[in-house]
Image (cartoon, helix red, strand yellow):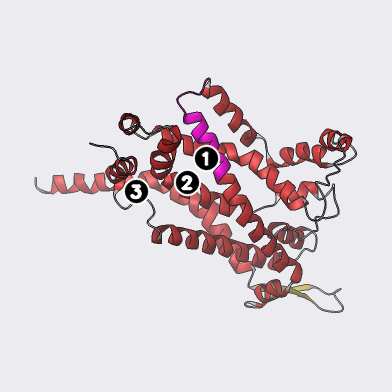
Amino acid sequence: MSAAPAVRRRRRSRVPALFLLPFCLLFAAFFVAPIGYAVYQSLFTTQRSGLGLGAAQTVFSGLANYAAALRDAAFTGSMLRVLLFMAVETPVMIIFALLLALALDAASVRFPALFRSAFFAPYGVPGVIASLLWGFIYVPGISPVVQVLGGVGLHPDFLGPQTVLWSIANILTWEFAGYNMLVLTASLKAIPDELYEAAQIDGAGGLRIAWRIKIPLISGALILTTVFTIIGTLQLFAEPLVLRGLTANISDSYTPNLSAYTQAFTDSNYSMAAAEAVILALAALVLSFVFLRLVQRAGGPGAGGPRAGREAGRRRTGGRR
């Protein structure tokens, strides 16, 4: 009789593992395995004998592909380009998404659901389609924007060598600001109304409530969207790939992803493409880790939980319990 409860406990302990098993299998098959294969492939090199006309032979080369990628001026230039792009685009994206979220959360806004859907709608447009749409606006011969600006004496070159990167940044901001806004809006809705009421009783206006209560209490969501933006900007691919057909100022190695794509599907150098992909993944990992560490050192969220956040909000507004 005493063995029956123990058997039931063992069976119940297996239930969570059974529910997690499908996820673990899919995660291993579609995430861990491709990464492992990319790392494995980056350690080999394909060699041909007889002036390149002989049979191909795959040989172990260790870190030679990584060394070659880091010596390649085009690839290192693309890495520096996306790092600059990330440094500018990330704060622009987060600030713009935050302003949209705060505007929608304001008590005086009318038809919030309509504006929320309108702001989020560009996220539903695939990156390729968005690049084509904006490409028609950027090309001088057919762009209505360029024609209107030309009528007042301005002649912008959105696809010029100094401006094309920021034209791509405009496309990304248009695409993803609504998604980040939705994440921030959900966090704003979770803030208790009692904090706003206490602040208003103490004479705090809308701007002070936003600065002293709303922004500090959604800092976790701000960090999350910032990390996603850092990773996304480093993976820039679809937009320059589409715009490359409209301008000569986007090369085959304009971004690291585009360089890896060219290595794999134009030059058939899959080992080099794998090495460049691994380098890019490591760069995204390091930058995300550094950002999180800096936030943690600066006293980021999570130290005291929701109650600590509410107490901090009261202290910032001078509120009373």
Residue in front for this viewpoint, 31 or 299? 299
- Tag 3 residue: 17
Query: Does the magenta stretch mainly form a helix, a strand or a loop?
Result: helix
Cα separation between marks 3 and 2: 33 Å
Q: Amino acid at mark 3?
A: Ala
Q: The C terminus lies in which quarter of the figure?
A: top left
Q: Secondary structure at mark 2?
A: helix
Magenta span contains residue 104: yes
Cα separation between marks 3 and 1: 39 Å
Q: Secondary structure at mark 3?
A: helix
The residue that appears at 52% across and 31% down in the rendered structure is 103
- Tag 1 residue: 98
**Horizontally, is 126 left or right of 190 in the view?**
right
Q: Which residues are magenta?
A: 95-110
The residue that appears at 69% across and 57% down in the rendered structure is 257
Residue 72: image quadrant is: bottom right
Q: Amino acid at mark 1?
A: Leu
Number of marks present in the image shown: 3
The percent coordinates of residue 254 (x first, y second) are 75, 58
Q: Which mark is residue 281?
A: none
**Residue 298 visible somewhere in the drawing:** yes
Q: The N terminus lies in which quarter of the figure?
A: top left
**Horizontally, is 265 left or right of 101 in the view?**
right
